[in-house]
């Protein structure tokens, strides 16, 4: 997978006002942490962070703090967004070691046109990322899934994926993508399928003087 070198500045843990000022100046506060060491508060230019967050690929981040030559290999572990603007407001970088497995969410890339679409179905995507566990060197940028052979009423499950050196952190029966009938079609099937005797005719209420049989 690809690696990206990122420049960061160390910051002091401070008040919310100072953190907000960082954001106003075009920077995003974050934390770098790894097992056995103290977390390092940092901040990164918002434009740089966007390339790591808003992407369909996974990257290893070679982090340089305060312009130092020493690089800290890491991955983005968590990102917080503003609920109104969707702007990134905080991030976590997890330090990694070449000989230790890590868990990470990897984007899914779907290709092909499902044959079930020609049968009247629609493609339903249940997942857009998969959590995996593997060594850093084996992390894929994305996982490609060919949906061409999915027929109407069929699906691809986690158990159907076969990737070497990777463990999926989901149950085998979890559905990733399926082809189903459109909701409008599903809702009309029960009414059309009712036996003739079960169909209820509307009651007709007459107006005016009753007939002799009605009296």
Image (cartoon, rainbow, N blue to C red):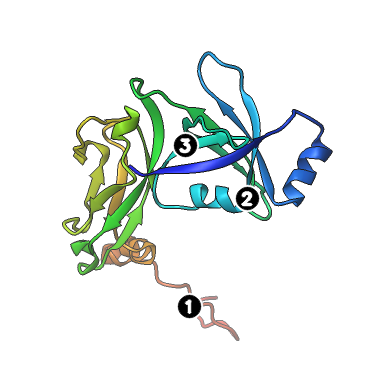
- Please tell me how crowded label 2 is: few (under 14), some (14-19), or many (20+) other residues with Cα within 10 Å: some
Dot 3 and dot 2 residues touching (CB under 8 Å): no
Q: Is residue 204 above or below residue 110?
A: below
Q: On the image, which quarter does residue 190 sit in?
A: bottom left
Q: Position of residue 129 (x, y in %)?
A: 39, 44
- Whole-Å distance between the Cαs marked 1 and 3? 93 Å
Helix, strand or loop under label 1? loop
Instruction: Residue at 29%, 64% (x, y): give it.
Output: 197
Q: Which residue is mark 2?
A: 46
Q: Residue 129 shows which numbered tag?
A: none
Q: Position of residue 172 (x, y in %)?
A: 26, 32
Q: Earlier in the sequence, mark 1 or mark 3?
A: 3
Q: Nearer the viewer, mark 2 or mark 1?
A: 2
Instruction: Residue at 21%, 37% (x, y): give it.
Output: 163
Q: Is residue 49 above or below residue 166?
A: below
Q: Position of residue 99 (x, y in %)?
A: 33, 20
Instruction: Residue at 39%, 48% (x, y): give it.
Output: 57
Q: Which residue is mark 1?
A: 213
Q: Which residue is mark 3?
A: 62
- Please tell me how crowded label 3 is: few (under 14), some (14-19), or many (20+) other residues with Cα within 10 Å: some
């Amino acid at each position: 997978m690809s690696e990206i070198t990122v420049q960061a500045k160390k910051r002091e843990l401070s008040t919310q006002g100072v953190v907000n000022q960082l954001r106003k100046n075009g920077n995003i506060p974050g934390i770098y942490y790894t097992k056995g060491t103290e977390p390092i508060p940092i901040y990164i230019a918002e434009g740089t962070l966007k390339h790591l967050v808003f992407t369909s690929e996974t990257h290893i981040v070679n982090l340089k703090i305060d312009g130092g030559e020493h690089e800290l290999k890491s991955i983005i572990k968590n990102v917080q967004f503003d609920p109104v603007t969707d702007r990134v407001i905080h991030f976590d970088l997890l330090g990694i070691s070449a000989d230790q497995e890590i868990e990470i969410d990897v984007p899914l890339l779907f290709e092909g046109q499902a044959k079930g679409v020609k049968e009247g179905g629609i493609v339903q995507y249940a997942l857009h990322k998969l959590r995996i566990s593997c060594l850093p060197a084996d992390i894929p940028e994305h996982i490609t899934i060919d949906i061409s052979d999915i027929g109407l009423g069929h699906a691809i499950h986690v158990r159907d994926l076969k990737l070497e050196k990777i463990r999926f952190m989901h149950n085998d029966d979890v559905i990733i993508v399926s082809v189903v009938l459109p909701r409008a079609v599903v809702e009309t099937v029960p009414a059309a399928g009712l036996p003739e005797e079960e169909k209820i005719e509307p009651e007709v209420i007459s107006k005016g003087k009753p007939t002799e049989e009605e009296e």
